[in-house]
Image (tube, helix red, strand yellow):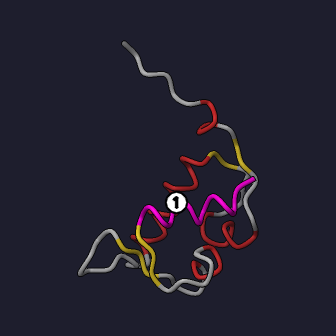
Amino acid sequence: MVRKVNPALLKPMTLTAELEAVTGKGPMPRSQVVKKLWEYIKKHNLQNPANKRNIFADEKLLPVFGGKKEVNMFEMTKLVSKHLS
């Protein structure tokens, strides 16, 4: 049985300027946004070394994370949703 990909995940979304500062110009699907976020996080070494599930916000991520200095992966996904329309 082949799993169908949720079409909502493939639909290009409009990104806020704050999110575009991190991921690059939209529109892009949610999956691509998450992938680009992780590329950015790894490139700038923003994972908490003591707890890999937590991500530190730099000046570009702070507005995306609603001003929080550190968020966990699940929280990040929720906060990023607010920047997609």
Residue of label 1: 77
Picture residue at 67% right of the left edge, 49% below the top: 28
Kindly indicate the quadrant of the structure image that contains residue 82: bottom right
Question: Image quadrant of residue 79?
Answer: bottom right
Mark 1, secondary structure of its residue? helix
- Considering only vertical position in the picture, is 59 above or below 40? below
Q: Which residues are magenta?
A: 73-85
Query: Is 69 rendered above or below residue 11?
Result: below
Q: Among all residues in the image, which is located at the extreme left?
A: 50
**17 is higher (above) or lower (below) than 56:** above
Position in image of residue 32 (x %, y %): 56, 49
Which kind of residue does numbered mark 1 sit on? Answer: Thr
> Which of the two residues, 53 or 58, is positioned nearer the viewer here?
53
Residue 17 quadrant: bottom right
* Quarter occupied by the N terminus: top left
Report if residue 23 lies within the magenta region.
Answer: no
Identify the residue at image location x=65%, y=79%: 63
| Spot occupied by residue 59 in the image (x, y as percentages of width and height) | 58, 87
Position of residue 13 in the picture relative to residue 55 (left or right):
right
Mark 1: few, some, or many residues within 10 Å (few <14, many ≥20)?
A: some
User: Horizontal and vertical percent for residue 26?
Assistant: 72, 55
Tell me which residue sits at (54%, 83%) in the image.
68
